Amino acid sequence: MTISKKRSEASKRNGAKSKRPNETGKTKLNAVADGLFATSMVIESLGEKREDFEALELQFRSGIQPANGFEENLIHDLVASCWKKRRLERVETAEIQRALLEIKLGEDMSRQAELSALISSFELLLGQRSSAQLR
């Protein structure tokens, strides 16, 4: 009996040392990190809407009109693939826009550095002229 009590106390101590978040809100989107293991097709934090997914599914169902389980599975796969492809297109567009913005900011910072160097040179030149005039 004392062994199980010791184990219980050790377990409580070890559990208190855990660094896991206690709130499920912090962990519920962990699978979204790569999107491969997400339990839901719709990721609202990316701006996706369940209504849009359902409309896409309805569009496929009404166009194909599945007659059996095999065709149902095909529709499921088609809708999922189409949905993920659209997501990837949005992500790709956002990444390209981000990269272009970084390039623009980099160019602006480069221009700003050039301008600062030019101003410093000009101030140095003015400082040399004024000190020569004072002599």
Image (tube, rainbow, N blue to C red):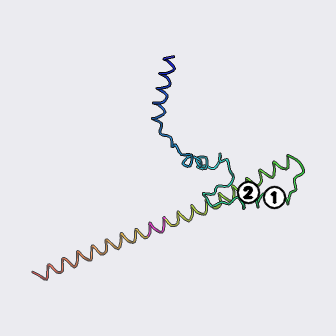
Q: Secondary structure at mark 1?
A: helix
Q: Which residue is mark 1?
A: 60
Give the amino acid type for the residue marked by disc 1 in the picture: Phe
Instruction: Say whether marks 2 and 1 touch (CB < 8 Å).
Output: yes
Would residue 49 be found to the left or right of residue 67 on screen?
left
On the image, the x and y values in percent for residue 123 come to: 24, 76
Q: Determine crowd level at label 1: few under 14, some 14-19, many 20+ residues with C-alpha closer than 10 A.
A: some
Magenta residue check for 45: no
Give the quarter of the image for residue 115.
bottom left
Give the amino acid type for the residue marked by disc 2 in the picture: Cys
Q: CA distance from mark 2 to mark 1?
A: 10 Å
Quarter holding the C terminus? bottom left
Please give the name of the residue rendered at 68% of the width and 60% of the height, measured from the top-left corner. Answer: 49
Please give the name of the residue rendered at 27% of the width and 74% of the height, measured from the top-left corner. Answer: 121
Secondary structure of the magenta portion, mostly?
A: helix
On the image, the x and y values in percent for residue 65 come to: 88, 56
Q: Determine crowd level at label 2: few under 14, some 14-19, many 20+ residues with C-alpha closer than 10 A.
A: some
Between 7 and 131, the one nearer to me in the picture: 7
Of tags 2 and 1, which is closer to the observer?
1
| Stretch in magenta | 102-107
Give the quarter of the image for residue 112.
bottom left
Q: Which residue is mark 2?
A: 82
Q: Which mark is residue 103?
A: none
Instruction: Residue at the far left: name it.
Output: 135
Give the quarter of the image for residue 119.
bottom left
Would residue 109 be found to the left or right of residue 42 on screen?
left
On the image, the x and y values in percent for residue 9 come to: 47, 26
Between 71 and 113, the one nearer to me in the picture: 71
Q: Secondary structure at mark 2?
A: helix
Establish if 67 lies above or below 103.
Answer: above
On the image, the x and y values in percent for residue 76 come to: 78, 51
